[in-house]
Image (tube, rainbow, N blue to C red):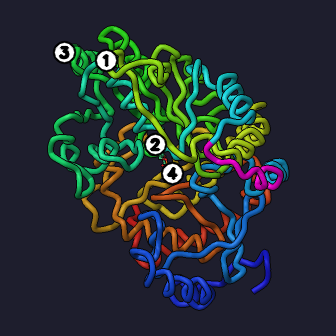
Amino acid sequence: MTEGQTTATSPTGATTYADQRGRSNELFAQAATLAPAGVHHNLRSAAPFPLFYERGEGPYKWDADGNRYLCYAMGQGSQILGYSPPAVVEAVRKHAAFGIPGGSHALEIEWARLVGELIPSAERTRFLASGTEATMLALRLARAHTGRSTVVRVQGHYNGWHDYGLIGYRAPFDEAATAGIPDEVLATVRTIRSDLSPSELEEVFAGEDVAAVILEPSGASWGTVPLPSHFLASLRDATSRHGTVLIFDEVITAFRWAPGGIQSLTGITPDLTSLGKILTGGLPGGAVAGAAEILDLLRPDKSPREGYVLHHGTFNGHPVPAAAGIATLTGAASGEAQQAADGHVAALRAGLQEIVESLSIAGFAYGDSSVFHLYLQSPDGEVVGDVSPETMTTERYLAMPRSLIAALHREVRSRGVDLFSYNGGMASGAHGDAELELALSAFDGALRALVQTGVVATA
Ligand SMILES: Cc1ncc(COP(=O)(O)O)c(C=O)c1O
């Protein structure tokens, strides 16, 4: 198969899918003997096997068999300028020879200055090695600042995979989503629904025992379950009144929803912000940014009694991600890439909705900014009924069967389009009109196949 071709497919996509991806299948067989399930991130597992990718350029990526995909995963959301933007590639090339990880260097200053210019809450910035580390440090800072232990998380929101992040991530929300979390840790995390009223939110913090509340300001998993319009302002009010640190986890939304993230769009400024993904141009890294009064607890001239927060990390502020991050944030600062991505996805959502309606599918397309979600139901599911983005709840969203989601991924992949996790994706500034046509044609074919095979419910 040559570059640019998409694959032919049977109505279910099941036979030709594997045939046309023989090299990925071989690589998976090798990987599976070396790594658990052959992958290094649990969501990368895919049926019948995960694809192994070789390169990306603009809105496209190529797998090990040379198949090209129009990508809506975009490096798990990290590529707002498209894959391999020349300025980022050049910055990485130039600094690859800078062989001094683990020491201070001038790029850190330029990088932190850019973060401070773009992100409204960023009076100070501390770089670290991943988005998960960013949320973990933000929570420790909040506990040190307040002298309180309890952390509030919003049910269904993803804030990284550390112990605190995986309590309240999946139903049942009062249990940990993973084995290995001590009961003592569980006792320090309280979870709340995302549809609480202002007075209910007030009650959560009124006891003045909560160190921090952390959430995705887009709503769970980049807006799959949108927040009520009052939610962020109500949280800001209640947390300010009761001395709780408000943490916006903008690992996905910063530099995507707008160069300054959701906080710049809403004018609601959190005390701390966790950052990652686009921050580093897609290389490993992250940051906590926020109020100087809180970030300065990291200063080693303090003692633990004064709230000193110990934080190390060999690769914090590594020069290569720093160089990629500077090039990316410089390219993303004007907002043009975000506007192009938003425009592309708005047209994609509208086109998807038309397809869904024309096939009488019991579902809908929705989303904010440059992301889209396609809510579908299975014919034998419990959730068929009157569901819309306004009435979406975390439980309804999470009740979408895994098998249906896997079938959607496989059918669109068979037609040369790759999604992000669950039932949606996100675009970059490199996604244009030609890609829109390609995507809609792939979704049309995929959804027809899912209706024909009885995987998706029709109204
Ligand atoms: C909102 C949010 N917070 C935190 C993280 C964790 O970031 P990382 O995967 O870099 O550890 C993610 C990752 O997808 C995320 O989406």
Question: Residue 67 or 126: which is nearer the viewer?
Answer: 126
Question: Residue 213: image x %, image y %?
Answer: 34, 27
Q: Quadrant of residue 110?
A: top right
Q: For mark 3, give the secondary structure.
A: loop
Q: How would you classify the magenta stretch by its main secondary structure? A: loop
| Three-letter code, disc 4 | His
Residue at point 44%, 24% (across, down): 229
Question: Residue 7 or 51: which is nearer the viewer?
Answer: 51
Residue at point 52%, 31% (across, down): 288
Callout 1 touching callout 4 (CB < 8 Å): no
| Ligand 1 has an atom within 8 Å of the beta carbon of the residue at disc 2 | yes
Residue at point 45%, 80% (across, down): 34
Q: Which residue is mark 3?
A: 207
Question: Residue 169: image x %, image y %?
Answer: 31, 47
Q: Which residues are magenta?
A: 92-102
Of the two numbered discs 1 and 2 on the same chain, state the one appearing first in sequence: 2
Callout 4 touching callout 3 (CB < 8 Å): no
Q: Which residue is mark 1?
A: 305
The residues tagged by marks 2 and 4 sit, at their Cα atoms, a distance apart of 27 Å
Residue 133's disc is 2
Pair 1/3: label in front:
1
Of the two numbered discs 2 and 3 on the same chain, state the one appearing first in sequence: 2
Question: Residue 155 or 299: which is nearer the viewer?
Answer: 299
| Ligand 1 has an atom within 8 Å of the beta carbon of the residue at disc 3 | no
| Three-letter code, disc 3 | Gly
Question: Residue 401: image x %, image y %?
Answer: 34, 64
| Three-letter code, disc 2 | Glu
